[in-house]
Image: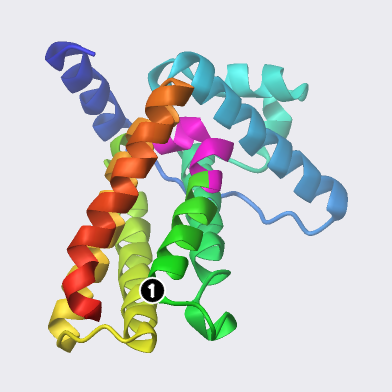
Amino acid sequence: MSGKKQNKRLAGVKQESLRPVTRRRRPAQERSRTTVSSILDATETLIEQEGIDRITTNKIAEKVGVSVGTLYSYFPNKESVLFSLAQRWLEMNNQAVAQGLPDKKPDSNWMDWLDQLFNDVFEVYLKEPGMTQYYDTLRFIPELRELDDQHERKMIKTMTSALTTLGHNGSDRERRIDSLMLLLTIHTFMTRAVIAEPADRSAILRQLRLLIHSMLLPRFV
């Protein structure tokens, strides 16, 4: 994508971010929860097919097979749908990181933990490639930026604890920095791997493992 097109798209998202993103009501009944889930799934599909800037509430409603009025009974605008979709994506990442923590697998070493972490997180990235590709753009929505900052702090705390459990020999500060580097590096490589051809994808993930292993090896010797 050219720089001019990228800047135009980001500017559009930034202007739209002034609109409220709070959901109108929480789905209490199973049918309502199913409708909300369908709305988010449809939005994810549209993101993959058309990109964020071309999505409208009319297109989302049509994709789901509901009226726009029904969509508006849950979400006041497109930004609210995108925010909720991002919330879901972050929660999926939280669960992926949590399920492989060393306190749940006491016999694992740091390399086993990293391999499991890569596999679990990449499954999330593959499941919702649209969110993976556009998530950084969506951070122009102020509420999402705040949510992402909270997510990052939580992930750094979780990974720092995991590194400590696994025998990381650095200081507390060094463990926090290494955790941040893990988050940034994994996100950068996996965002690219999702859109790569299968052979290139395997190579990217293989290089990611080697890079992280080489970065952390001195901390565990």
Dominant SS in magenta: helix
Is residue 146 inside the magenta stretch? no
Residue, disc 1: 110
Relative placement, left or right, of 93 versus 114 is: right
Q: Can residue 142 be seen in this view?
A: no
User: Picture coordinates of residue 116 (x, y %)?
Assistant: 50, 61
Q: Which is more toward the observer, 52 or 123?
A: 123
Relative placement, left or right, of 100 versus 210 is: right
Image vertical order of residue 168 relative to residue 15, above or below:
below
Residue under the image location 86 percent in, 46 percent down: 31
Is residue 124 inside the magenta stretch? yes
Q: In which quarter of the image is the N terminus?
A: top left
Residue under the image location 16 percent in, 73 percent down: 218
Q: Give the secondary structure at mark 1.
A: helix
Q: Which is more toward the observer, 112 or 192?
A: 112
Q: Give the range drawn in magenta.
A: 123-132
Residue under the image location 43 percent in, 24 percent down: 199
Image vertical order of residue 73 relative to residue 54, above or below:
below
Q: How crowded is mark 1: few (under 14 residues within 10 Å), some or many (20 or more)?
A: some
Give residue 114's quadrant in the image.
bottom left
Q: What residue type is labelled 1?
A: Trp
- Residue furthest to the front in view is 221
User: Picture coordinates of residue 17 (x, y %)?
Assistant: 32, 38
Image vertical order of residue 149 relative to residue 221, above or below:
above
